[in-house]
Image (spheres, rainbow, N blue to C red):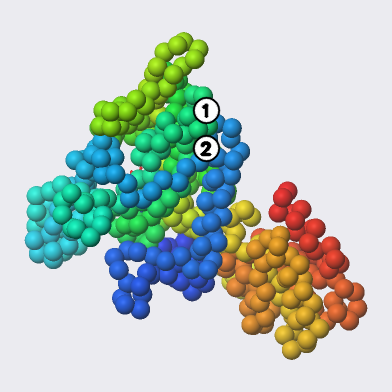
């Protein structure tokens, strides 16, 4: 088991710097910005969608495709409201809310201390419970019979499909069902950029096990999910495990451990791994009248499986990967002068652009053509960018700032003398000169190594 870490410093980057970089380079924009935006909602730009897609793909590859005991699912966002009655969300998916009588701001009661407003020092109201599910209506009639909810978690899709998936795949316990998809919560205090939003993407696994083996599987999944963040580059000192105290456990949980990252706002949850016992399947049996038991051929018994649930957020992990990768380096320019460069040391699997092909001189047609041809040759194999809109120094700086792994420069020597190009490494800034015909195989090998 990984130990809970002691005191370490967060990344030197502030949230403001990350927000600014994300906008300037096209990772994340404020949603509806030209209309003044709307409470903590964000749109992913050209680089953001690539990064997000890479995170999703890495998660899916490791947790579904590489495992014989997990299969995938994509359930609907709007489903039968009875699902949310059975799960306890209609009655209990609430946060305590307080209002300031002076400045009228609203806070989550468990996020403020005492009854004094943290914004203006005014008097806070008594806490009231506030249901966080987004309500809508199915069809043209907006009466109570037509009420439906946007799902606040993807997990229930797996529970209500347990029988379908088990019968279709013939999986034996232990096995899991995984899903990545949007969830919606009417958070009282969203904020901190994409850390807490009202629309977000979750990556969840419901892993069904024999009762009695649940504690062992819980430990295994905690370790597995912790290792996953390290594998993709999170600094181990900024990642810790925090078991929940008994009094903070959710009603369905026998034990939960959070994986926390040291964000600029302090240690905060990236993912929770809960032992949900047989709570959900039993509730759905009770509410639907369906038999959701599992027939154990070995003993001839029908049992209700226990469930281990690793539940993470794609947006939140994207934020952690960005923060952890960010570095402002002072570099030697060679002439005794110092320079500053901002670089994103993103893991090679996650980097939104793998290679940029840059012509040294954009007014030399042979150089431009050679560079464009090389970019076209690389494009089917990896995310490739061509850029000739600035001087080479500035082009390097741009690519470093978005985490591009390699920059290839086509120069006069390439077209006049040796058909060779330079490959510059993002992290070491080392340059090697190689025949243009070898570039593709060299980069494919580096990517796969
Ligand atoms: P919190 O205590 O931060 O509100 P939670 O314990 O309610 O989170 P879970 O229900 O365990 O969160 O959700 C699992 C994961 O989904 C979280 O670890 C997080 O990564 C992500 N997540 C939950 N709520 C949000 C949100 N409002 N915005 C972005 N991601 C979220």
Q: Is mark 1 within 8 Å of ligand 1?
A: no
Q: Residue furthest top?
A: 299
Residue situated in front as seen by the camera: 142 or 15: 142
Locate residue 375, reporting x and y percent. Answer: 73, 70
Question: Tag on residue 71?
Answer: 2
Whether residue 314 is situated above or below residue 47 in the rendered picture: above
Locate residue 117, reporting x and y percent. Answer: 15, 58
Image side of residue 309 versus residue 102, left or right? right
Whether residue 443 is situated above or below residue 129 in the rendered picture: below
Residues at marks 2 and 1, CA–CA distance in whole angstroms: 9 Å
* Mark count: 2
Q: Which residue is mark 1?
A: 171
Image side of residue 444 versus residue 30, left or right? right
Residue positioned 33% across, 34% down in the render: 244
Q: Are marks 2 and 1 in contact (CB under 8 Å)?
A: yes
Q: Secondary structure at mark 1?
A: loop
Residue positioned 49% across, 15% down in the render: 297
- Badge 1: few (under 14), some or many (20 or more) residues near its Cα, within 10 Å? some
> Considering only order in the chain, which callout, 1 or 2, is on the residue closer to the N terminus?
2
* Residue 215 placement: quadrant: top left
Residue positioned 9% across, 64% down in the render: 102
Whether residue 9 is visible to the viewer of this picture, yes or no, is: no
Residue positioned 28% across, 32% down in the render: 288
* Residue 67 placement: quadrant: top right
Locate residue 269, reporting x and y percent. Answer: 38, 46
Q: Residue furthest right?
A: 417
* Residue 242 placement: quadrant: top left
Question: Tag on residue 441?
Answer: none
Whether residue 196 is situated above or below residue 246 in the rendered picture: below
């Amino acid at each position: 088991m990984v130990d809970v870490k002691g005191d370490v410093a967060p990344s030197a980057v502030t949230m403001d710097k990350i927000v600014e970089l994300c906008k300037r380079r096209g990772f994340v924009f404020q949603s509806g910005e030209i209309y003044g935006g709307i409470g903590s909602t964000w749109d992913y730009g050209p680089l953001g969608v690539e990064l997000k897609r890479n995170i999703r793909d890495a998660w899916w590859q490791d947790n579904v495709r590489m495992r014989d005991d997990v299969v995938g699912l994509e359930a609907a966002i709007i489903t039968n409201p009875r699902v949310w009655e059975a799960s306890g969300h209609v009655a209990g998916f609430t946060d305590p809310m307080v209002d300031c009588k002076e400045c009228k701001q609203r806070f989550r009661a468990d996020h403020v201390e005492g009854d004094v407003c943290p914004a203006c020092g005014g008097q806070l109201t008594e806490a009231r419970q506030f249901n966080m599910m987004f309500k809508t209506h199915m069809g043209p009639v907006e009466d109570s019979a037509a009420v439906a909810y946007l799902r606040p978690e993807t997990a229930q899709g797996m529970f209500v499909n347990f029988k379908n998936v088990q019968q279709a795949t013939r999986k034996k316990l232990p096995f899991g069902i995984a899903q990545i998809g949007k969830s919606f919560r009417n958070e009282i205090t969203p904020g901190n950029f994409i850390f807490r939003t009202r629309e977000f993407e979750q990556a969840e696994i419901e892993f069904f096990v024999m009762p009695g083996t649940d504690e062992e599987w819980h430990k295994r999944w905690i370790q597995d999910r912790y290792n996953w963040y390290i594998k993709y580059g999170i600094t181990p000192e900024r990642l810790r495990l925090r078991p929940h105290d008994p009094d903070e456990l959710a009603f369905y949980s026998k034990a939960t451990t959070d994986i926390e990252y040291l964000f600029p706002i302090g240690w905060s949850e990236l993912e929770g791994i809960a032992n949900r016992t047989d709570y959900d399947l039993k509730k759905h049996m009770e509410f639907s009248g369906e038999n959701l038991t599992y027939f154990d051929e070995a003993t001839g018994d029908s049992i209700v499986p226990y469930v281990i649930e690793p539940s993470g957020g794609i947006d939140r992990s994207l934020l952690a990967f960005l923060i952890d990768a960010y570095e402002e380096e002072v570099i030697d320019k060679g002439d005794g002068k110092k320079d500053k460069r901002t670089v994103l040391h993103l893991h090679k699997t996650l980097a939104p652009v793998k290679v940029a092909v840059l012509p040294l001189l954009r007014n030399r047609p042979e150089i431009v053509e050679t560079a464009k041809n090389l970019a076209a040759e690389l494009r089917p194999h990896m995310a490739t960018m061509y850029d000739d809109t600035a001087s080479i120094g500035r082009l390097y700086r741009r690519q470093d700032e978005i985490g591009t792994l390699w920059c290839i420069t086509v120069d006069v020597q390439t077209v006049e003398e040796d058909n060779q190009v330079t490959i510059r490494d993002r992290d070491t800034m080392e340059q090697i000169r190689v025949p243009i015909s070898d570039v593709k195989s060299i980069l494919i090998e580096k990517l796969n190594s």
